[in-house]
């Protein structure tokens, strides 16, 4: 009797990676593999990796070290994703027990790579460079998220921000046809999902290869798919953020009241060094469109502190921008030099303690801004999509359309299922979450 083919997969990094994993899992299942919950039980162990910052990259090598003794038991290892693409065959030197290394731009070749693995080959690579025009579309997506259906609409990135590995790890920008996106949206709805998240490293740089729809039109069309109640999209680049996106959100209630618009820095000088191709004023103009919308749209952002050459004055400009925009959520990062990127040739001049202090000051300031922003919801009744339970607190957890976490109590004996909706009255507010009761 043939032994059963089993796999364990762990994902690091962004939502694009989480969704890539859903497609990889579907492909493996199609090839006859069964997913297991523990490394120990798997014949094939896969890590879908992230290399956005140094710490993220270290994680996979730590994991490989932890588990290398399992190799003796005849297990095979595969490294997928951004570290795989970035390090390529060097991974075989560093971790000789790894048999397969593949970047995301080569996933469409996974069935063939798996066949070679099964035939006993040990150094299999999928390292298509950034020139590929192919996207990874599969009908075998094994959706793991119980309440949110992801759809990749654009892969890769052509922006080449000075600090960023993504253009090198995910290859050049290539969009999926709008017909195929809409067909997948319908399929997701038929599966019972009512929330869709459109994904891309630069989602709003979308160019329909069929020439039919702009990004804003595609958003509107997805928002009109029967059964869909919430549409989100991430990540937007300020350079490609057009006014019709705000108009679409205003016009279609199914498009969520939230835009994630990474600014990275509030200093014109640093933005120039980062090759972001906009100034703070350009960015703030887009913010003013969002704030002028008829619906209250929440705004979140990413900020890097301690970019090479960032002075105390540059940092104050970032703090000023924070106060001006009054974000609802900020993801702050200390700059970390990345292989292949132009910023690596600049002197990483800010000591780590200084980066840490700037980051702390930024997050402290933002906490106070959010305390005020979130307090405005006190007494409101809002629709919350249920994501899970916090049994310790006896609370249901979920999110508002604005993407704010809401924890609430409800009198029903059975907890509402992930993906269902509740009307919740807000009874208390915190800087990072709202508390309420179902009405
Ligand atoms: N160092 C620190 N943060 C980075 N990011 C991207 N590259 C780096 C880097 N080299 C941050 C950016 C981006 C987010 C996903 O990660 O803020 O928007
Ligand atoms: Fe990490 Fe960026 Fe790759 Fe996502 S695209 S996995 S954030 S390096």
Image (cartoon, helix red, strand yellow):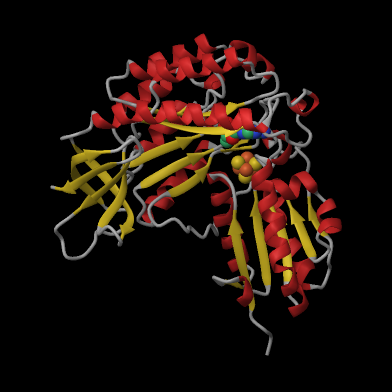
| Residue depicted at x 46% and y 15% | 320
| Residue depicted at x 69% and y 46% | 82
Position of residue 398 relative to residue 42, above or below, is above
Residue 257: horizontal and vertical position, in percent? 33, 31
| Residue depicted at x 74% and y 40% | 132
Position of residue 118 relative to residue 195, above or below, is below
Residue 276 seen in render:
yes
Position of residue 87 relative to residue 331, above or below, is below
Report whether 89 appears left or right of 59.
right
| Residue depicted at x 58% and y 68% | 29
Report whether 29 appears left or right of 319.
right
Residue 286: horizontal and vertical position, in percent? 45, 16
Q: Which residue is farthest top?
A: 281
> Which quadrant would the N terminus be assigned to in this image?
bottom right
Q: Quadrant of residue 323?
A: top left
Towards the viewer: 285 or 175: 285
Position of residue 182 relative to residue 203, above or below, is below
Residue 279: horizontal and vertical position, in percent? 57, 11
Residue 208 seen in render:
no
Q: Which quadrant of the figure shows ligand 1?
A: top right
Residue 149: horizontal and vertical position, in percent? 44, 50
Report whether 200 appears left or right of 79.
left
Query: How many labels were placed on the picture?
Result: 0
Towards the viewer: 93 or 336: 336
Q: Which residue is farthest right?
A: 93
Towards the viewer: 162 or 178: 162
Report whether 386 appears left or right of 196.
left
Towards the viewer: 352 or 204: 352
């Amino acid at each position: 009797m043939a032994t059963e083919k089993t796999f364990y997969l762990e994902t690091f990094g962004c939502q694009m990676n989480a969704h890539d994993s859903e497609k990889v899992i579907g492909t493996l299942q199609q090839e006859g593999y069964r997913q297991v919950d523990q490394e120990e039980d798997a014949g094939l162990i896969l890590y879908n990796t992230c290399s956005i910052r140094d710490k993220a990259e270290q994680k996979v090598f730590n994991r490989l070290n932890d588990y290398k003794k399992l190799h003796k038991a005849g297990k095979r290892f595969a490294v997928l994703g951004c570290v795989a693409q970035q390090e390529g065959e060097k991974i075989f030197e560093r971790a000789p027990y790894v048999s397969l290394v593949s970047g995301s731009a080569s996933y469409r070749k996974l069935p063939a790579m798996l066949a070679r693995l099964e035939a006993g080959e040990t150094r299999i690579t999928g390292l298509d460079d950034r020139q590929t025009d192919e996207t990874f579309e599969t009908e075998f997506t094994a959706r793991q998220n119980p309440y949110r259906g992801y759809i990749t609409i654009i892969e890769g990135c052509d922006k080449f921000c000075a600090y960023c590995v993504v253009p090198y790890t995910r290859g050049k920008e290539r969009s999926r046809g709008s017909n195929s996106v809409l067909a997948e949206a319908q399929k997701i709805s038929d599966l019972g999902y009512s929330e869709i998240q459109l994904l891309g490293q630069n989602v709003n740089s979308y160019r329909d290869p069929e020439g039919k729809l702009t990004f804003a039109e595609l958003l509107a069309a997805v928002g009109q798919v029967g059964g869909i109640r919430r549409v989100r999209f991430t990540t937007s680049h300020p350079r490609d953020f057009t006014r019709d996106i705000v108009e679409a959100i205003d016009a279609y209630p199914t498009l969520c009241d939230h835009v994630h618009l990474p600014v990275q820095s509030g200093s014109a000088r640093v933005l120039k060094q980062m090759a972001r191709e906009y100034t703070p004023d350009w960015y703030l103009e887009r913010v003013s469109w969002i704030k002028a919308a008829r619906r209250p749209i929440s705004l979140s952002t990413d900020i890097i502190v301690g970019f090479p050459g960032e002075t105390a004055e540059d940092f104050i400009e970032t703090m000023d921008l924070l106060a001006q925009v009054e974000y609802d959520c900020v993801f702050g990062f200390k700059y970390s030099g990345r292989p292949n990127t132009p910023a690596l040739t600049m002197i990483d001049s800010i000591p780590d303690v200084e980066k840490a202090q700037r980051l702390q000051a930024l997050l402290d300031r933002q906490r106070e801004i959010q305390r005020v922003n979130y307090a405005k919801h006190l007494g409101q009744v809002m629709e919350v999509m249920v994501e899970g339970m916090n049994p310790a607190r006896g609370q249901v957890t979920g999110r508002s359309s604005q993407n704010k976490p809401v924890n609430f109590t409800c009198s029903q004996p059975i907890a509402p299922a992930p993906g269902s909706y509740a009307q919740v009255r807000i009874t208390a507010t915190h800087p990072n979450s709202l508390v309420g009761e179902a009405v």
